[in-house]
Amino acid sequence: GSYSNHGSQERILDVYNGNTANGTHIITYDPNGGGNQKFTFVPTSGGYNIKNMSTGKCLDLNRGPSAGNGDYVNEWDCLGQSTQQWRVFPWPGDPGAVGIYNVSKNDCLDVFRNGTGNGVWADIWPCKRSDNENQKWTLQYLGYSLQTG
């Protein structure tokens, strides 16, 4: 199915300006119902590709396997590499929430520097589990979307 991904600030993962170019930043933004805010989880042998319903591209790491703490998440053609594979785990103490981590880095999908406004980019950061609200996501089944916390 498709999901919107809400974080702790009720912002949704969003492909910046709905751009279809490889390397476009994934940001958080107020929900607006646009296709650039709708994602589907496609099963892979290592987890899931998180694919945007509008652009058809997958969440990936800027700098690929060399990505480090704070490197942003972008969209890229779905190629099946480990930097495009994500796993989901239950959020401790909140049965409706999850954490999402990248298979190649074992780092979590994160809202950069705990940002709360529109346009803050999604990045990766070491998983903090229960004490990092900016790594807490709620998957809301929309028939087409993905949201944070």
Image (cartoon, helix red, strand yellow):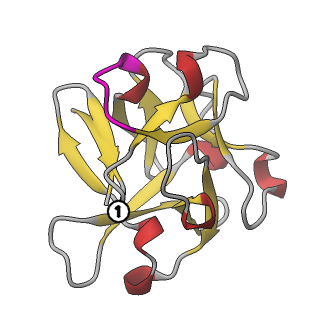
Question: In this picture, is 82 found above or below 100?
Answer: above
Helix, strand or loop status at disc 1: loop
Where's the N terminus, which quadrant?
Answer: top left
Crowding around mark 1 (Cα neighbors within 10 Å: few <14, some 14 to 19, many 20+) is: many
Left or right: where 104 falls relative to 88: right
* The magenta stretch spans residue 55: no
Where's the C terminus, which quadrant?
Answer: bottom left
Q: Position of residue 64 (x, y in %)?
A: 77, 46
Q: Residue at x 34, y 32 (%)?
A: 40
Q: Viewer-proximal residue, 27 or 130?
A: 27
Q: Position of residue 50 (x, y in %)?
A: 44, 38
Q: Viewer-proximal residue, 58 or 32?
A: 32
Q: Which residue is labeled 1 in the image? A: 8
Q: Residue at x 54, y 23 (%)?
A: 57
Stretch of the chain drawn in magenta:
30-35
* The magenta stretch spans residue 32: yes
Q: Viewer-proximal residue, 89 or 119?
A: 119
